[in-house]
Amino acid sequence: MLADTMGRPLRDLRISVIDRCNFRCRYCMPREVFGTDYQYLPRSEILSFEEIDRLVSLLVPLGIEKIRLTGGEPLLRRDFPTLVTMLAKHGVELALTTNGALLAGMAEELVVAGLDRVTVSLDALDEETFQSMSDTETSVAEVLAGIDAAVAAGLSPVKVNAVICRGVNEHAVDDLFEHFRGTDVTVRFIEYMDVGASNKWRAEEVVSGAEILQILAESHEFEPVAESVVGQVAKLWRTKEGDEVGLITSVSEPFCGDCCRARLSSSGELYTCLFAETGFDLK
Ligand code: SAM
Ligand code: SF4
C-alpha cells in the first residue's frame, strides 16, 4: 500500500475534473478574482477522461479505496456521466461533490453510470443568504430538487455540506438541521478555511465546530457517535431520536495526522495536502 513520508496510507483520491464553476461562492471563487477576465486552463491542459482513467487504474492497486469527483463544479464537465461509467469499472467507491444546481436533471443518469454517493453543498435555506454567499442566481429550490432527485435515484444517504461564516449564515445551522432531520439526508457543517490568497480569509469569520454544536444544543441534546473509520473527516453527533449531524473541524482541530487523501487537479498535478502550494505533475 502506498504511504507518504509520515506513514499515512493513501486511501482516498479526490479528482478535480474541471476548474470552472457556475457559482462564485465568496469563500471559494470570489467574483473579484474569478471574473470575466480570469484565465482558466485551456482545454488542452485539462486531463482527458482517458488520462484520468489511466491514472485511476494505476492508483487503485496502490490502495485507493474511494474516489470523489469534484471541481470547480464537476457537473459542468461535458459528458460527465461517461467519465463516471469509465471510473465505476475500477470497483472502488465512487462519490461526487456538487453544488447541486444541475443535479436534478442528472441524478438518475449518474446512478445508472455507476455513481455510489453524492454530497451537495448548500449553505443556507433562505434565498437571500444562499444567493449572496454563493453569488449565484440559482435558487435554493433548484438545489433542493437536486437533493430530492439524488435520494429518489437511490443515492441515500445524501450528505449536505454547509460552510458557516460568522455574521453571514449562523442561522443556517438550525435551519438546515431542522429541515433535513428525519430524512435520508445528513447535514455536515464545515469550518470556513483559508484556501489561499483568493478568499481573504479572516480567523474571526470562522465559526468553530464547538460553536456550531452549541447552537444546535439549544434545541436538541446530542451525544458523540464513535468514529467508525480511521481518518473519518466529519465528527458525528446524534440526537436521542437518531438524527445525525457532522462537524468538519479542519481549522479548530486539524486532522492532518489521520489524513489519507490525495488530490488530483484538473491539469494532472497530485497534491497530498489541501493547503499545498505546488503539486507533483503526473502528466
Ligand atoms: N462545486 C462543488 C461544490 O461546491 O460542492 C465541488 C467543489 S467545492 C470546492 C467542494 C467543497 O469545498 C464544497 O462543499 C465547498 O463548500 C467547500 N469549500 C470551498 N471553499 C471552502 C472554504 N474556504 N472553507 C471551507 N470549505 C470550502
Ligand atoms: Fe463553485 Fe463549489 Fe467553489 Fe462554490 S464551493 S465556487 S460551487 S467550486
Image: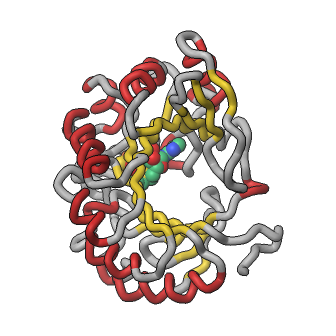
Closer to us: 1 or 36: 1
Indicate whether 210 appears above or below 52.
above
Q: Residue at x 28, y 32 (%)?
A: 131
Observer-nearest of 21 and 163: 163
Q: Which residue is situated farthest in the left direction here?
A: 105
Corner quadrant of residue 113: bottom left
> How is the rendered protein coloured?
secondary structure
Q: Position of residue 39 (x, y in %)?
A: 34, 65
The furthest residue to the right: 6
The residue closer to the viewer here, 147 or 263, is 147
Q: Is residue 135 visible?
A: yes
The picture places residue 251, in percent across and down from the top left corner, at 67, 40
Which residue extends farthest top? 218
7 relative to 129 in the view: left or right: right
Question: Which residue is rendered at x = 70% and y = 58% of the image?
Answer: 259
Write the residue at 46% across / 81% down. 90
For the image shown, how many numbered marks are present on the structure? 0
How far across and how far down the image is residue 134, in percent? 33, 38
Report the quarter where the N terminus lies. bottom right
- Image height of 109 relative to 201, above or below: below
Q: Is residue 28 visible?
A: no
The percent position of residue 229, horizontal first and vertical second, equals: 68, 54
State left or right for residue 73 relative to residue 249.
Answer: left
Q: Residue at x 69, y 31 (%)?
A: 224
Q: Quadrant of residue 4?
A: bottom right
Q: Is residue 37 above or below residue 80?
A: above
